[in-house]
Amino acid sequence: MSHFVAEVVVIGAGIAGISAAFHLAVREGLDGVVLVEAGDPLALTSDKSTECYRNWWPGPGDAMVAFMNRSIDLLERIERESGGRLHLNRRGYLFATAEPSRIAAFRDLGHEAQSFGAGALRVHDGSGSSPGYLRSPARGFEEVAAGADLITDPALIRAEFPYLDPEVVAVLHARRCGWLSAQQLGMWMLERARDRGVRLIRGRVTDVETRGGRVRAVSVARPGDRVRIETGKLVLSPGPYLAELARGFGVDLPVACERHMKVAFRDTERAVPGDAPLLIWADPVELPWSDEERAVLADDEETRALVEPFPAGIHGRPEGTPGEHWLMMLWTWDTETVEPVFPVPFDERLPEIALRGWSRMLPSLKRYFARLPRMTVDGGYYVRTPGNRPLIGPLPVAGAYVNAAYSGFGIMGACAGGELLAAHVCETPLPAYAAAFHPARFDDPGYLDAFASGADGQL
Ligand SMILES: Cc1cc2nc3c(=O)[nH]c(=O)nc-3n(C[C@H](O)[C@H](O)[C@H](O)COP(=O)(O)OP(=O)(O)OC[C@H]3O[C@@H](n4cnc5c(N)ncnc54)[C@H](O)[C@@H]3O)c2cc1C
């Protein structure tokens, strides 16, 4: 067994662990940071995402909006420092509804987001008094004002988004949102971290040694070898293995895993333009079937659910050069808690269900029904806390910290999360939102009361 000493050991080289190492070593200037990874960096969950970001979050309070605004500031800084390596755009998130009763909810959401600091709500109702709606460019992020545009003017909706179902009565376009290359973000931070002395050790942390209520060392298993790293500081960023790893040294964390998959195919029929924003259908969906298909499906207990209404939540976006682009479709209607298993199992009917569900929003997708395109499916686990906020900060064992539970927002939140984690470890001043993500918040028995009525912002 080999043996060495580290100042800080970060477990997991997904986007969260890499950002933690980067902020500790590069931004805070700490020496002796070691990053331990059981597989390949960024290859378990962080390369399966839709790579999107948004400053559009519900309450309680403005913590999520403030945290994401900070993270997007940092993403934009990296985009500039790296000479455009992230391909960061600001095309926005476009929520669409065909239900007139939802327009009031869109307006309320816009006002709430504005009060949290997401930017102004602009209403375009065709009355002539509203300011003009400005399109988001396909590339870049400098020219688009933050905030959101609520469009209820039917002519404007048709003119700007002719590919949406003609029954759409309102769209809400949140603007400080878009996407980037998550792999480039991770690799850029990892390269800088390694240049600044961060050591990447390949192997699985099997044991965390504590004594007298303090972290003392970790053991790492590698093929044919074991390494013991003596350290007084440990950062947990092990993605879906968080609960198991923390339990191993006596810490119970309130996290659960949910499976989320995405389906992608080359959109040869151009059902969506390649320069579209991220699209979200805000209404429940009934899958379109012929009468004959419907009767057959309803008759069989195994398939009966396919003729029942599905919950809202369809979202996705075009990927790649417009004209040769793919469509990435996400829709998790089943959000039950599962144990993480790899490779991630999924329902074989998912591609067809997703395509049919998506055709409610993009009717041109029906052109694919007769002959399904070749589709790829991948995905991973959202590691969630009740309330859907990450865990960032110290744990009850002295020297142990967590930077994890990033649910469906780990790419967009990684930069502010790594920065916050580093501030905890280095004992530099904390931002106002730190308390909202501190693991000890769950010690307050009333903590979740404020969440009871609202949506948690998950997509
Ligand atoms: C389908 C899907 C779509 C998504 N879309 C978005 C999106 O649009 N925008 C967004 O911001 N987020 C999105 N996400 C969420 C985002 O991908 C995750 O929040 C993020 O990748 C989590 O990163 P992580 O570093 O915490 O975990 P991971 O990427 O899982 O990394 C954890 C790492 O720790 C390693 N590890 C675990 N245990 C050990 C151990 N004992 N020893 C050593 N190494 C260990 C693992 O091998 C792994 O590499 C999406 C997720 C999914 C599944």
Image: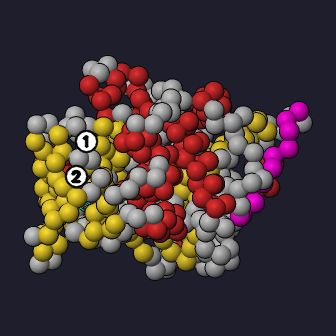
Q: Position of residue 455 (x, y in %)?
A: 45, 34
Q: Quadrant of residue 302?
A: bottom left
Disc 1, disc 2: CB below 8 Å? yes
Q: Position of residue 45 (x, y in %)?
A: 36, 62
Q: Residue at x 56, y 36 (%)?
A: 66
Q: Quadrant of the N terminus?
A: bottom left
What is the C-alpha distance between the residues marked 1 and 2? 9 Å
Where is mark 1, residue-wise?
Answer: 399
Tell me the magenta residue range.
129-139
Q: Inspect the magenta stretch and tell me whether residue 80 lies in it.
A: no
* SS of the residue under disc 2: loop
In terms of image quarters, where does ligand 1 lie?
bottom left
* SS of the residue under disc 1: loop
Crowd tier of the residue under label 1, counting other residues whose Cα lies within 10 Å: few below 14, some 14–19, many 20 or above: some
Residue that extends furthest to the top in the rendered view of this protein: 446
Q: Which amino acid lies under the numbered mark 2 shown in the image of this protein?
A: Thr
